[in-house]
Image (cartoon, rainbow, N blue to C red):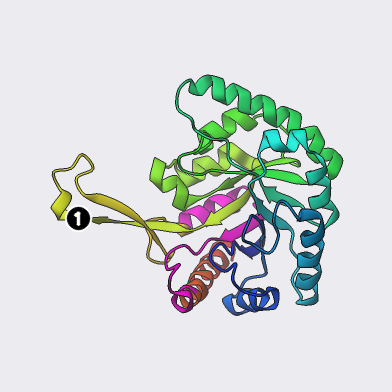
Amino acid sequence: MQISWSLFPKFFSHLSLPALAELVRESGLDTTNLVVRDGFHVTPEHLAEELPLFLRVMRREGLEVRFATTDFTAEGLLAKPEILTLLADGGLRDFRMGHFPDRGGDVRTALREARDALERLSPLCERAGIRAVTQLHNHTLIASPGIAYYLFESLPPEWLGIELDPGNQSFDGQEAWGRSARLLGSSLVALGVKDTGVIRNMGRSEAPDKGWVRYWSPIDNGVTDWTEVVQALDAIDFRGTFVFMPFYAPDEPDEMRRRLREEVAYLRQITAEVVA
């Protein structure tokens, strides 16, 4: 396997760029995702000016940033393909695109429309030299490997990729990791590293959900078998990005940093044992 160990700094937008780079280093990661969102270091409105600055500072800090997290939708990119060129010209090679929404109603028609959008987006990504990655995310149209395979079958994995996400997938139910990896094959280019736990509120035991609640958890305490996940990726010679997503203590930054270090060490140990 070839893995880039990266951070999705959703709850660290308050840090300066040098401080963000220091967080990456102290956590045992290789790099960070570039996040393109309002309220972050790079915003959609000022992408052309802010993106080169972000990448330049990170290179000065010794980090090569190759993966971006964005909310650019397929339809938005089809309307403004110059966004792809801006991302690629900065040296980015992959970006998580915005989700296809699950609006309810006629799901089959929505899937056909998503497939059509992906088919039209692929040559634009190839022309720019950057890959659009779809994250399997709860409460979106593409929430499972089976649906992803249906949409991405025969599309070029060089320009359209898929990101497994055990934490998010756990909210909608999940498929066996080994089968998922074999099903997606070379289209599987990223892994969202976050997990959940479950707890029961007995005061709600008579409710339809019987009081069971799912919550964000560090991966060393969550419900996912990460050895099984890494074994599944190793079996297909995974080459891509592990994106760490610390969501479990957003109001306690020091605690989040401590537990992130533990998470990274935990998954690095598992990975070393699997590939030994």
Give how far across and how far down residue 83 sits, in percent.
Answer: 78, 45
Residue 239 visible (yes or no): no
Q: Quadrant of the C terminus?
A: bottom right
Give how far across and how far down residue 76 sits, in percent.
Answer: 70, 37
Q: Please name whichever residue, 242 or 52, is drawn nearer the observer in this view of the structure.
A: 52
The answer to whether residue 176 is magenta is no
Residue 201 visible (yes or no): yes
Please tell me which residue is depicted at 63% across the width and 73% down the height of the picture: 24
Q: Is residue 17 above or below residue 92?
A: below
Please tell me which residue is depicted at 69% across the width and 31% down the height of the picture: 118
Q: Please name whichever residue, 158 or 112, is drawn nearer the observer in this view of the structure.
A: 112
Within-10-Å neighbours for mark 1: few <14, some 14–19, many 20+: few
Q: Helix or strand or loop: what does disc 1 sit on?
A: loop
The answer to whether residue 232 is magenta is yes
Q: Quadrant of residue 80?
A: top right
Give how far across and how far down residue 42 sits, in percent.
Answer: 71, 60
Side of 110 where 129 appears, left or right: right
Q: Amino acid at mark 1?
A: Asn
Extreme front residue here? 45
Residue stretch rendered in magenta on the structure = 227-256
Return the residue at label 1: 201
Give how far across and how far down residue 128 sits, in percent.
Answer: 84, 43
Q: Quadrant of the N terminus?
A: bottom right
Side of 235 where 218 appears, left or right: left
